[in-house]
Amino acid sequence: MDEKVEVVAPAGNLASLKAAIENGADVVYLGFNDATNARNFEGLNFTPEELEEGVDLVRSKGKKFYLAVNTFPQRDSFSRWQRSVDNAVLLGADALILADLGVLSYARRRYPDINIHLSVQASASNYESINFYRSRFGIKRVVLPRVLTIEEISLLRQRTEVELEAFCLGGLCINVEGRCYLSSFVTGASTNTEGACSPSRFVRFTTGEGDRLSITLNNVLLNELEATESSPYPTCCKGRYMMPDGTTSYAMEDPESLNALEVIPGLIEAGVTALKIEGRQRTKSYVAQVTRIVREAVDSYYEAPASFRIRREWERQVTSTFEGSSQTLGCYLEK
């Protein structure tokens, strides 16, 4: 059988990086603590100096790390993205995860031998687009947007030599990743240039009568929750809004988390090279738990592909990590 798919786990800080490595990740992916990466939340990510300790740990365990420089520079800010690319190369990143055409061009021209992965932020979901990035910038892998069925992924595999990486657990974004402007519209701070959807400085939680919780983004009401209800991190797409008939509804997207454990065999057999866990903004306990479960699931598949089954404890433990109230297979089986 071919080499196992990689388990790619998130690392928003050094503690999460250690948790990922200790629980079976083949690769950790991370970013610098500035606007050059698409999880630019306060208190997350690394300076180049802070990352050196993490790199030492990764190397000591024989693992790899991928570094995301996957937002979109504007006007006179391009030099910051150049520095992030330079620092990633100096640190010895096993791959740079890039999205912007200019950043891709700079990285390939300046460092002709580096390994480049196309970020999900580029939203490349068809083989013509993927093959364009390969021919122009020599990308080795594409991180697929969460809008494709397994059947479509299998067809992509037949039409491109680029490796395919697919999300298997965590938050779900269906709003044409890298091209969504809902948060930008409400806050004036661009998700695609600052690297944070619904930046925390605009989020407010207020408790009202009967412990009812109101969640606002830049003074725009996104949701009101009873004391018994839970909610994911507040984003516009997962807000609950007043409908024309006077009812309230999750008008765009239910607050669900992606759980593709049961279709891991289908994803592997469709030809993906890597299974990615979302959640650089989550805690080290989340990273440890979901990384271990995906590791066990992947190993279980390779031990006996025909008899692969989801273990009850996996389902229970994964469900406990969800942001929101339910799980979904996303588009993997149907749209």
Image (cartoon, rainbow, N blue to C red):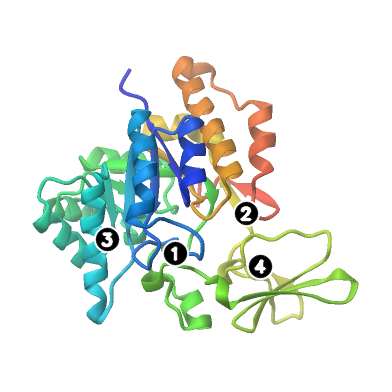
Which numbered disc, 4 or 1, marks the residue that appears first in the sequence? 1
Crowding at dot 4, Cα within 10 Å, few <14 / some 14-19 / many 20+, comes out as some
Q: Residue at x 58, y 23 (%)?
A: 309
In space, the residues marked 4 and 1 are separated at their CA atoms by 26 Å
Query: Considering only vertical position in the picture, is 244 above or below 136?
Result: below
Does any portion of residue 72 appear in the rendered image?
yes
Image side of residue 68 versus residue 303, left or right = left
How crowded is the residue under tag 2: few (<14 C-alpha within 10 Å), some, or many (20+)? many
Q: Quadrant of residue 293?
A: top right
Task: Judge from the rendering whether residue 245 lies leftward or rightward of residue 332; answer left or right.
Answer: right
If you read the primary sequence from the N terminus, does the residue marked by circle 3 or circle 2 appear first?
3
Q: How many discs mark residues in the rendered view?
A: 4
Gap between marks 3 and 2 measured at Cα: 33 Å
Rounded to the nearest angstrom, the CA distance separating label 4 from label 3 is 38 Å
Residue 189 in the image: state x and y as whole percent: 45, 79
Residue 280 position in % (x across, y down): 48, 52
Residue identifier under label 3: 84
Q: Are marks 3 and 1 in contact (CB under 8 Å)?
A: no
Tell us which disc is closer to us: 3 or 2. Answer: 3
Any mark on residue 250, and which?
A: 4
Q: Alpha carbon of mark 2 to alpha carbon of mark 4: how far?
A: 11 Å
Determine whether 307 is above or below 142 in the image: above
Q: Residue 45 or 279: which is nearer the viewer?
A: 45
Q: Residue at x 40, y 54 (%)?
A: 145
The three-letter code of the residue at mark 1 reads Asn
Picture disc at residue 40: 1
Amino acid under label 4? Answer: Tyr
Which amino acid, by three-letter code, is at mark 3?
Ser
> Residue 150, located in which quarter of the rendered image?
top left
